[in-house]
Amino acid sequence: MADPLAPRVLDVRRLEPPEPMERVLDALTDMPEDGRLWVLHRREPFPLYDLLRRLGYAWRTLGEEERFEILIWPADFPPSRSELDWRIPC
Amino acid sequence: MLNTGGLSLDQAPPIRVPFAFFLAAPLFAILAGGFLLWQGNLALLTRWSPAALAVTHLIALGFLTQVMCGALFQMLPVLAGARVAAVTRVAPLVQGCLVTGTLSLSGGLYWGGALWLVVGAVLLSCALLIFIGAAGLALARARGVPRTLQAMRLALLALLMTLLLGGLLVAVLLGAPIGGFTHWVDLHLGWGLLGWVGMLVMGVGYQVVPMFHVTPAYPPWLTRAAAPLVFAGLLVATGLTLTGSAVPAAWGFGVSVSGLVLFAVVTLILQRRRERPRLDVTLIYWWTAMLAALAAALVWALDGRVEPIGVLLLIGVGIGLPSGMLLKIMPFLSWFHLQHRQVTTRRFDVRLPYMQVFIPERLARIQFGVFLGALLVTVAAAGWPVSGWGAWLARLGGLGLVVSSVLLWWLQAGCVWRYREISRRLG
């Protein structure tokens, strides 16, 4: 059974453009004002960053070939240390 | 990975720049199909017929080069991370010269007339030199995606060689005393089809195949070797022709063909290993183009007629691949620009449609079906042009090309109409 307290992770690795961006923007629409969204992507989504900035979000990307973890949060509600340290399980 | 650390839509040209090229291109495919419909197998009996020369240039310049110019004006800022200088003034100038030059040259090749040939050659030289200058400058400054950039730089050099050789051939047609006409034509074709088209397809493919079809990346050995192999082969062929060894020059072309065959085979294997099982029309167009390229290489290796090779490369790859990419890229650009416009205007009450709405997949499949029928019938007509059915097959192929190109234009126009309608609602 899914842990209700587990961070919200959106896996878009198997989607073709622009579906990953569509899914991320849809997810942000439903996110509470102090919420966080973890995205698992197969490429670093550079075009998304410009939109996030304009929408008032901040982000942090960690990644390597074929696997990038992007943590997105409202710019006014920065993440805690433990949220920054959390990694999406493989 | 794209060098897009600072990518924003501000760096890309206005959407009207690539769309102007994309919307004008099918009109030339309609003209080429109309020529086939009108001339029948006269256009396919021999590559030296006036009709064949006119159709070849309508497709190669009017359709293919036009789409490639529009796509590169769109892609270069993304790859280079820098805007092409004065793109809103340079692009219409390039397009104006390209359109009028192609019409003039094709008319001159069909009806004869030195004036049309000269006007065509001058206008095309203006169009392509300005384009090569603008694109070359951006490519010289570009960083990142080294293999894609390498293939694109080599493709641009190949375009320059094609243009120089084309100028030489026009001079011969006007009476300049230069020997070995057919060998220069072979080089012009080689640099144009294998070099400009082939290496540009490679450069674009290295990025868009893994991205749009969710496949593994191209293997490094291929991206390192394929385009340089094509280029080296063409250099060898040119060198041998210049030194009067035109027959062994075919070995140079063989090296180039092997580079493209490798690319086509690896592309088909990667697409079989794609993560998403969905068969969209762009993917089917890629398969068709890669199989057409392989079939052309096979006919060439077996020393078959050159006319079906030309049909496979010009229609199968030259019209097919850009058509498939247009059906993906135009909705993508429309959606992407609208998304940014919505964020800029803060009009979140307007619901943006998903990308598939801009060009309905079902209609795109019908368009592909007509195109495939036209391709197969025209290949058959070029393979057996003197049979009793040859003339009718050629006319049927021409009709199919006209219908599929009208359908392509109609789908593109629908995409632009939807884009404008939503853009208006966003204010």
Image (cartoon, coloured by chain):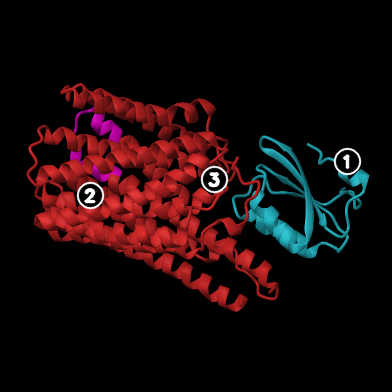
Magenta residues, start to end = B296-313
> Residue placed at 60% from the left, 58% from the top?
B9
| Circle 3/circle 2 CB separation < 8 Å | no
Chain B visual colour: red
The residue carrying mark 2 is B56
The answer to whether residue B330 is left or right of residue B229 is right
Please say whether residue B312 is one of the residues in the magenta stretch: yes
Q: Which residue is mark 1?
A: A85
Q: B351 and A61: which one is in front?
A: A61
Q: Between residues A61 and A10, which one lies in front from this camera angle?
A: A61
The residue labelled by disc 3 is B79
Report if the CB atoms under discs 1 and 3 are less than 8 Å apart.
no
* Quadrant of image for the N terminus of chain B: top right
| Residue A34 can be seen, yes or no | yes
* Mark 2 residue type: Thr
Evaluate whether label 1 is on the same chain as label 2: no
